Image (cartoon, coloured by chain):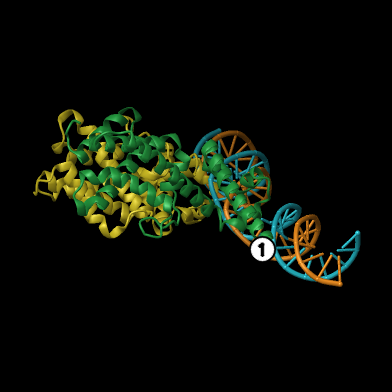
Chain colours: A yellow, B green, C orange, D cyan
Amino acid sequence: MTIQTRRERERAERRQLIVTAARELAEAEGWDAVTTRRLAAEIEYSQPVLYSHFKGKDAIMAAVAVDGCADLATELRQARAGADGVRASLAAVARTYTAFARRRPALYDAMFTHLVDLPFATPEAPAPLRDAFGELLAAVAPVSTEEDAGLLTETFWAALHGLATLMRSGRLPEWAHERRLELLVDRFAGPTRD
Amino acid sequence: MTIQTRRERERAERRQLIVTAARELAEAEGWDAVTTRRLAAEIEYSQPVLYSHFKGKDAIMAAVAVDGCADLATELRQARAGADGVRASLAAVARTYTAFARRRPALYDAMFTHLVDLPFATPEAPAPLRDAFGELLAAVAPVSTEEDAGLLTETFWAALHGLATLMRSGRLPEWAHERRLELLVDRFAGPTRD
DNA sequence: GACGTTTTCTAGCAGCGCTAGGAACACGAG
DNA sequence: CTCGTGTTCCTAGCGCTGCTAGAAAACGTC
């Protein structure tokens, strides 16, 4: 039994090695640089081993996305913890979310832009995804009615996502980002000055 | 001079033929199906003629995007014309925008998702782009202060864009779309029932 | 040390965006 | 009508992609 478990452990380690290498390569040079050949060279194995762990390149990106969601959830939690009051929490979460997208664009793309068959808005979604959404929910719920909290969080999330992606692709000017965030938070939290 | 002009006209016609073929192929089978070989076959020319009109595949997509913006602007204008009152206009524009994205996903991607080097938020942006944004602006301005109209429109646009893309990629459930739209319009127009 | 099983690699497929170089065409002059 | 000339267009091919079949190597067992 020990041999079996050792092999399984080694497989799991190598799987993580692939995910980490893909993530680092993507963050350093963008997803276009993450080819199966390049990735194989990076982990010092040949191409086909990638396919013994993942169905294809998309599945690798999905795994990277799950890891990224865990990171995002952590950052959002810290932002919320460091903010006093309902409006400040919402603003902090909004700023942290868009900063994350701007700071790690490749990772963000894998999480929320790239077409990927991860279950999202369902109970069987991976835990990190639900955690990240939960952080948003915790910030939005106080400015919502009880029954609309989930939907309002989704709407707020969509607005942040739109701002992040449109800005990154040059469709929105960056210099006004802070002011747009303020307008958004105003509309969701009400114009009350904290 | 007539020969020269005839040739220029024929070139312009063929250019439009390429753009139209690319757009129809993308809408029918998705952008993955729009390969330069396939597109060349579609217009009954060889591959290199594409490169005598456009710098590359991305430039073709950009041209399709500009066409698409003209369509979107038209639809938004009609939606606004058919709506009475500030809130109804905003709701109609929001519904029309997201419906456009859902009905013509490939076209929408070329316009707003795909990385493409079109000047967007500048005076030298192509007219159809400015027209489409102008329609949004006309709907948002009445619920805004004078100096914030542009920024608030950008923010509203981002929210619509986020809803459209997250929903299309399966990250937001479709069944609640109408309710999310209503929440969004509420937050921007105020909860006044028209 | 020889045998199965499992793991890993070499080599290759079909397709991609894009381009160099020559063939084929339309044109204006005699 | 014929002949150069200049432009237009196509054939062929480059280097790359994601992915996979089948051979080779490493491993555990007897």
User: What is the x, y in percent for residue B26?
Assistant: 53, 41
Query: Looking at the image, is A26 positioned above or below residue A113?
Result: below
Q: Which residue is identified by label 1? A: B1
Residue A22 can be seen, yes or no: no
User: What is the x, y in percent for residue B28?
Assistant: 54, 36
Q: Is residue A104 left or right of residue D22?
A: left
Q: Residue at x 48, y 45 (%)?
A: A57
Q: In this view, does A77 lie to the left or right of D12?
A: left
Q: Which amino acid does label 1 sit on?
A: Met
Badge 1 marks a residue whose secondary structure is loop
Residue B101 can be seen, yes or no: yes
Identify the chain of the residue marked 1, using the numbered disc in the image: B
Q: Pick whichever, A118 or B21, lies toward us.
A: B21
Name the residue at the front extreme: B2
Q: Pick whichever, B57 or A22, lies toward us.
A: B57
User: What is the x, y in percent for residue A180?
Assistant: 24, 52
Query: Looking at the image, is A41 positioned above or below residue B111?
Result: below
Q: In this view, does A136 lie to the left or right of A117?
A: left
Count of picture labels: 1
Q: Pick whichever, B134 or A179, lies toward us.
A: B134
Q: Residue at x 32, y 30 (%)?
A: A122
Q: Quadrant of residue A73?
A: top left
User: What is the x, y in percent for residue A15?
Assistant: 42, 45
Q: Quadrant of residue A153?
A: top left
Q: In this view, does A139 lie to the left or right of A57?
A: left
Query: Looking at the image, is A60 positioned above or below residue B2?
Result: above
Neighbour tally class for label 1: few under 14, some 14-19, many 20 plus, Cα within 10 Å: few
Query: Looking at the image, is D9 positioned above or below residue B41?
Result: below
Q: Residue at x 59, y 56 (%)?
A: B53
